């Protein structure tokens, strides 16, 4: 015994003294740590190493598992009288203790010791479950707890059954074996062994491990237990009721039905003795089962008892319909390759070390170093390899190079009696669980023992034993939990629950009312103390403010009138009115239709009033149009329709054409292999698109995944997956179901491998981790001068091994010079860029190459085109517009918003038929930053106000790229610019935002203002993607979208119309604001002439940008960007 054990004798103590060599060292105060009995022997070697290295005595107070939590909480509540400097806890205990201020915030210490701790080596979900709370670090992980399942392979193979992947399959397998003699003793055995015993606090973990996939589909932050907005328990939800019904059915074919409730130890023992075919439990007991010699028929270890990820479900609650429905990628975005929604349950969270907030400062450093010593990769390896330690792998290095039986990690396991095949199987299951984006956290609030105590267990058991109906059970559980929540305070519990899930606290309306009331009260108090002169001064300023407000209102009204006048007097107003009438199903008068066609073919600038048509000059110079190019007017009409919102009010033609039979079309579409519910997640890290771009190419293309290491990554290469989105439904169907499944969701090892850096550095092609480490100079060299106008995004993409987007984005962010000023973590940003590049689908046009071009062009307009200086942009605005360019097409569906609406795609339902693609791009891109992964969180040091301002700007910018608002936006900008460039007030944030939108929109459609070869290649890609959509519309027998009919579209004239209708009006406005950009109009004119030459069958000779055919055949030189715009950044 030693001093730290205290009185009462319920805990023991082991004191470790420094070695004799430390005799001459300065005396150090003893570090006292609380541990559980079961881990004492495992951690003593690391503690001895710390005592020797630091010359510091250590006392390890060890308590039984039943008293461990009680002793820890009681001591922490003692404050300055606390005995312990370091306490071992379970992850679920950390948030309540941290919220009460009992645990020391060690975020800064961890940040200063990232390399020593090998922080990136820890599984992402382990850090989320254990270490982090409220975006801060309060614990050092030394264990990773998750519940996994096991099956008796010998029994299943003899019966011709497969291991269950869903709970319904689990029940069917259990039903097959239940009541049969499985171990040869002549007595009936059970189908499964499930923990159901009451009183040990573990029954709730068994129950919610089963219920997790029913209750959670949208990722870890969704949570299992409460509605995070209202703190309403989820017992009355259809998902909970369906899960509890199925749990009772599973229990009816388990050992519970034969001999009553089982503890988790009893359940494991029965499974080992072959008295049941299926079982699920924590990794710790499963390790002991796999390693132990339990009569494996001549083999060392139980070769026929094999672990798996815990089963999932194929149905989910649809909040739109209010029913349980088959999973789609909208309701279950993390489906695996078999279409199963899994949610591995991190029961209790795992063991960790926290420093008592009451520990003296000079002992806190020693306590943290002791925790680091125990959790280090080297020392923790022996802990997790020891089967009986109940401490499980939590680092990537615990599985490093396991394929090599002679590797250091493999030898550690083999030394403790493992078989090589057992190590590999266990590593595969654990790594998948701790990288799963839908992993489920255990409850972490005040009063855990009350929520899962006797009342909860009794209520569930009454239902399991048939003593109570489901509805009565649900009501009883809800009343119980409401009462417990009320004891601690609903708002306090809600904030704690939300923080534990990584969500921000909810600010109640009463909070804002109180804040406003307090502000007003203070203002009244101050004003009442002011002298008369001060009151007069205040009155004067209020009057000035009123006048400024009235003047602002008058200016807005003038702007509205100016826009309306432009639309009323400019020909484009009449054109748009006729087109809207046509689109709404009204037959225009013959005279109106003739006038419209004449205007479209006239070559006039439809945006200028008739009386000012002849006064145009400078950058508004309009291109000459060839009168011989018949048909351009019709195509221009199509592009005008393309830039207008979709309307379903009707179409011209017969009643049969008007009746689209939307429901039948939608049903046929949803059953196809290409709607967004099936392929929108092609960009998920589990998918073949990810494997094709970053995966191990040594894997068999037929689908055999036996070869290759989960930690080996390869850069982009084209594969069969690139063909799918560019094919018609008929072509895709011909590819076969198996091929589509592999191309859409092939189960590649996830994101933690990519960002942790555990990759084969001998591979000849660049990995993502290597990309992030690429020096700035090498990065700039790969892409050339950044930003420049005359660059080739296709060449850059090829020369960087398919990583052009990553290189270009990194370069422009560095050149912008805003990262340091905004406290942006550059390394996290580089990881985020790599993740965005992974998420770009292989569409013909909306792909990574297009996005790299938009990023580059946006940077040019802002940094070299004069926008930054003209509008005095802030660093945050510059960063926001470059970031918006990066994500503006993230995970693009490859079809238009109109198509998604016509097909009643799930995305159109989720985003209410408004800017569907654009809203999805924003949601998915920001979702990456809400997963609480520090490797991606480049903004983690930002104040909340800056983050929300940045997010608001980015969303507004990305939504501006929706072509449905194009003409309205251009009309407003042109009306404003009638007053000249000075009409844009650089001090007005609204004007600056309008200018940023104009820059991003121009960059998005700037391809035809580039070199001819680039413009033509982008046009071909766009038409290819449009034709693929048209093929689908033809197959589904719906109205063909503009520009999508491969049988009737004149491609050359369509590009002339595209320039005239969409590109030129916007670039004219841009060049009025930014004269440095005027050179782009000449590029547009030259490329328009090239398309005319293509139509007439005469290709220009020589360099297409060196000369151009004008109407008289003479060549003219092409202007280049101004010297300031072409210099090296």
Image (cartoon, rainbow, N blue to C red):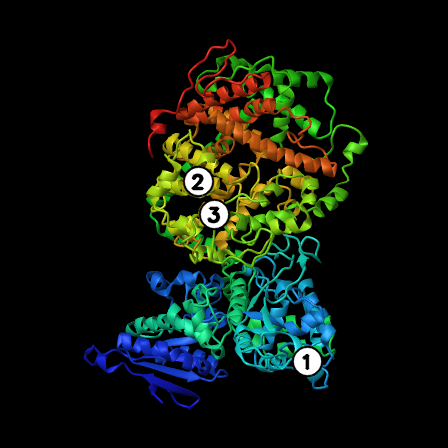
- Side (left or right) of 77 relative to 455: left
Lateral position of residue 812 relative to residue 958, left or right: left
- In contact (CB < 8 Å): disc 2 and disc 1: no
Determine whether label 2 and label 3 are within 8 Å by CB.
no
Tag 1 or tag 2, which sits nearer the N-term? 1
Q: Quadrant of residue 77?
A: bottom left
Does label 3 or label 1 sit earlier along the sequence? 1
Question: Which residue matches tag 2?
Answer: 882
Q: Which residue lies under the disc numbered 3?
A: 715
Q: Residues within 10 Å of mark 2 (few under 14, many from 20)?
A: many
In this rendering, position of residue 259 left or right of residue 205 = right
Q: Give the answer, above or below, for where 240 lies relative to 1030.
A: below
Residue 415 placed where, x, y %?
A: 44, 76
Q: Name the residue tied to disc 1.
A: 256
> Residue 976, can we see it?
no
Dot 2 or dot 3: first in sequence order is 3
Q: Is residue 743 above or below residue 635?
A: below
Which element is circle 2 on? helix
Please state which of residues 142 and 1104 is positioned toward the viewer in this rendering: 1104
Q: Position of residue 687 (x, y in %)?
A: 57, 52
Alpha carbon distance from label 2 to label 3: 24 Å
Q: Secondary structure at mark 1?
A: helix
Extreme residue in the top direction: 1112
Give residue 579's position: percent from left, percent from top.
66, 26
User: Which residue is the extreme one toward the front?
Assistant: 298
Nearest-to-viewer mark from 3 and 1: 3
Crowdedness of circle 3 by 10 Å Cα count: few (<14), some, many (20+)? many
| Quadrant for the N terminus in the image | bottom left
Mark 2 vs mark 3, foreground winner is: 3
Give yes or no for contact between labels 3 and 1 (Cβ–Cβ under 8 Å).
no
2 vs 1, front mark = 1
Determine the secondary structure under disc 3.
Answer: loop
């Amino acid at each position: 015994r030693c001093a730290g054990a205290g009185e009462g004798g319920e805990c023991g103590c082991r004191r470790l003294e420094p070695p004799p060599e430390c005799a001459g060292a300065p005396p150090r105060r003893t570090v006292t740590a609380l541990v559980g009995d079961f881990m004492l022997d495992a951690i003593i070697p690391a503690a001895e190493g710390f005592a020797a290295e630091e010359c510091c005595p250590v006392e390890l107070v060890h308590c039984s598992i039943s008293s461990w939590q009680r002793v820890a909480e009681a001591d922490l509540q003692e404050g300055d009288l606390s005995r312990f400097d370091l306490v071992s806890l379970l992850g679920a205990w950390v948030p309540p203790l941290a919220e009460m201020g009992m645990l020391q915030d060690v975020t800064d210490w961890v940040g200063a010791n990232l390399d020593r701790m090998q922080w990136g080596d820890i599984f992402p979900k382990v850090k989320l479950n254990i270490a982090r709370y409220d975006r801060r670090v309060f614990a050092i992980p030394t264990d990773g707890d998750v519940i996994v399942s096991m099956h008796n392979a010998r029994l299943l193979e003899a019966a011709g059954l497969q291991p269950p992947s869903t709970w319904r399959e689990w029940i069917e397998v259990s039903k097959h074996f239940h009541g049969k003699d499985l171990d040869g003793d002549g007595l009936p055995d059970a189908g499964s062994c499930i923990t159901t015993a009451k009183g040990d606090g573990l029954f709730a973990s068994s129950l919610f491990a089963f219920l997790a996939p029913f209750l959670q589909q949208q990722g870890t932050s969704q949570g299992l237990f409460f509605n995070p907005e209202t703190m309403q328990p989820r017992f009355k939800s259809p998902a909970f009721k369906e899960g509890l019904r199925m749990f009772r059915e599973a229990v009816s074919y388990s050992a519970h039905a034969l001999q009553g409730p089982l503890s988790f130890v009893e359940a494991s023992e029965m499974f080992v003795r072959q008295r049941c075919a299926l079982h699920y439990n924590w990794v710790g007991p499963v390790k002991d089962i796999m390693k132990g010699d339990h009569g494996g028929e001549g083999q060392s270890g139980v070769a026929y008892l094999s672990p798996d990820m815990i089963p999932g479900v194929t149905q989910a609650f649809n909040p739109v319909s209010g029913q349980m429905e088959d999973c789609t990628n909208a309701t279950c975005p993390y489906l695996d390759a078999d279409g199963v929604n899994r949610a591995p349950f991190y029961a209790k969270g795992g063991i960790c070390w926290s420093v008592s907030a009451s520990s003296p400062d000079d002992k806190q450093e020693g306590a943290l170093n002791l925790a680091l010593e125990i959790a280090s990769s080297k020392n923790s390896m022996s802990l997790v390899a020891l089967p009986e330690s109940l401490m499980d792998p939590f680092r990537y290095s615990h599985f490093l190079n396991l394929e090599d039986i002679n590797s250091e990690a493999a030898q550690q396991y083999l030394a403790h009696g493992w078989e090589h095949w057992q190590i590999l199987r266990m590593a595969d299951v654990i790594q998948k669980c701790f990288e799963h984006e839908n992993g489920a956290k255990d409850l972490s609030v005040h009063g855990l023992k009350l929520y899962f105590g006797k009342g909860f267990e009794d209520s569930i058991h009454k239902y399991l034993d048939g003593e109570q109906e489901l509805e009565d059970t649900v009501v009883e559980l809800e009343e119980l939990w409401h009462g417990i929540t009320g004891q601690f305070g609903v708002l306090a519990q809600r904030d704690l629950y939300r923080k534990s899930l990584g969500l921000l606290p909810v600010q109640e309306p009463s909070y804002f009312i109180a804040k406003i009331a307090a502000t007003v009260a203070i203002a009244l108090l101050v004003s009442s103390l002011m002298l008369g002169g001060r009151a007069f001064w205040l009155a004067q300023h209020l009057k000035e403010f009123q006048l400024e407000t009235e003047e602002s209102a008058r200016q807005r009204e003038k702007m509205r009138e100016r826009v309306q006048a432009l639309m009323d007097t400019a020909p484009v107003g009449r054109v748009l009115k006729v087109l809207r009438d046509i689109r709404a199903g009204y037959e225009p008068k013959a005279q109106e239709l003739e006038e419209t066609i004449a205007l479209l073919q006239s070559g006039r600038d439809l945006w200028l009033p008739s009386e000012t048509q002849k006064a145009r000059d400078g950058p508004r110079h309009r291109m000459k149009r060839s009168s011989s190019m018949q048909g351009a007017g019709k195509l221009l009409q199509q592009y005008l329709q393309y830039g207008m919102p979709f309307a379903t009010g009707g179409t011209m033609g017969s009643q049969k054409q008007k009746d689209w039979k939307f429901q039948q079309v939608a049903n046929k579409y949803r059953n196809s292999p290409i709607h967004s519910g099936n392929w929108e997640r092609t960009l998920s890290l589990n998918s073949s698109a990810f494997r094709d771009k970053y995966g191990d190419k040594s894997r068999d293309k037929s689908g055999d995944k036996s070869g290759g290491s989960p930690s080996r990554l390869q850069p982009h290469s084209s594969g069969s997956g690139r063909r799918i989105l560019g094919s018609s439904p008929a072509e895709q169907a011909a590819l076969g179901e198996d091929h589509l499944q592999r191309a859409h969701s092939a189960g590649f090892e996830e994101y933690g491998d990519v960002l942790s850096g555990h990759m084969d550095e001998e591979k000849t092609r660049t990995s993502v981790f290597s990309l992030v480490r690429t020096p700035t100079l090498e990065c700039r060299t790969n892409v050339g001068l950044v930003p420049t106008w005359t660059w080739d995004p296709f060449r850059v993409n090829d020369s960087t091994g398919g990583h052009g987007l990553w290189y270009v984005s990194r370069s422009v962010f560095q050149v912008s010079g805003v990262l340091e000023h905004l406290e942006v973590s550059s390394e996290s940003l580089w990881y985020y860029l790599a993740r965005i590049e992974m998420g770009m689908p292989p569409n013909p046009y909306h792909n990574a190459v297009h996005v790299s071009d938009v990023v580059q062009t946006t940077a040019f307009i802002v940094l070299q085109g004069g926008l930054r200086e003209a509008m005095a942009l802030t660093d945050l605005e510059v960063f926001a517009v470059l970031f918006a360019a990066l994500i503006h097409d993230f995970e693009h569906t490859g079809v238009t918003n109109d198509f998604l609406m016509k097909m009643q795609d799930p995305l159109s339902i989720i985003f209410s038929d408004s800017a569907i693609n654009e809203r999805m791009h924003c949601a998915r891109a920001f979702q990456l930053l809400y997963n609480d992964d520090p490797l991606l969180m480049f903004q983690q040091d930002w104040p909340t106000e800056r983050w929300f301002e940045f997010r608001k700007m980015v969303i507004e910018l990305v939504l501006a790229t929706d072509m449905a608002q194009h003409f309205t936006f251009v009309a407003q900008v042109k009306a404003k610019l009638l007053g000249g460039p000075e009409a844009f007030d650089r001090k007005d944030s609204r004007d600056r935002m309008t200018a940023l939108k104009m820059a991003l929109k121009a960059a998005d459609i700037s391809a035809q203002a580039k070199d001819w070869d680039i413009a033509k290649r982008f046009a071909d890609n766009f038409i290819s993607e449009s034709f693929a959509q048209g093929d689908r519309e033809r197959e589904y027998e719906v109205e063909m979208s503009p520009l999508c009919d491969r049988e009737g579209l004149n491609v050359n004239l369509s590009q002339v119309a595209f320039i005239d209708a969409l590109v030129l009006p916007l670039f004219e406005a841009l060049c009025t604001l930014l004269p440095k950009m005027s050179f782009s109009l000449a590029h547009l004119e030259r490329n328009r002439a090239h398309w005319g030459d293509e139509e007439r069958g005469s290709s220009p000779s020589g360099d297409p940008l060196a000369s151009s055919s004008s109407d008289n055949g003479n060549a003219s030189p092409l202007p280049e960007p101004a010297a300031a715009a072409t210099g090296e950044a």
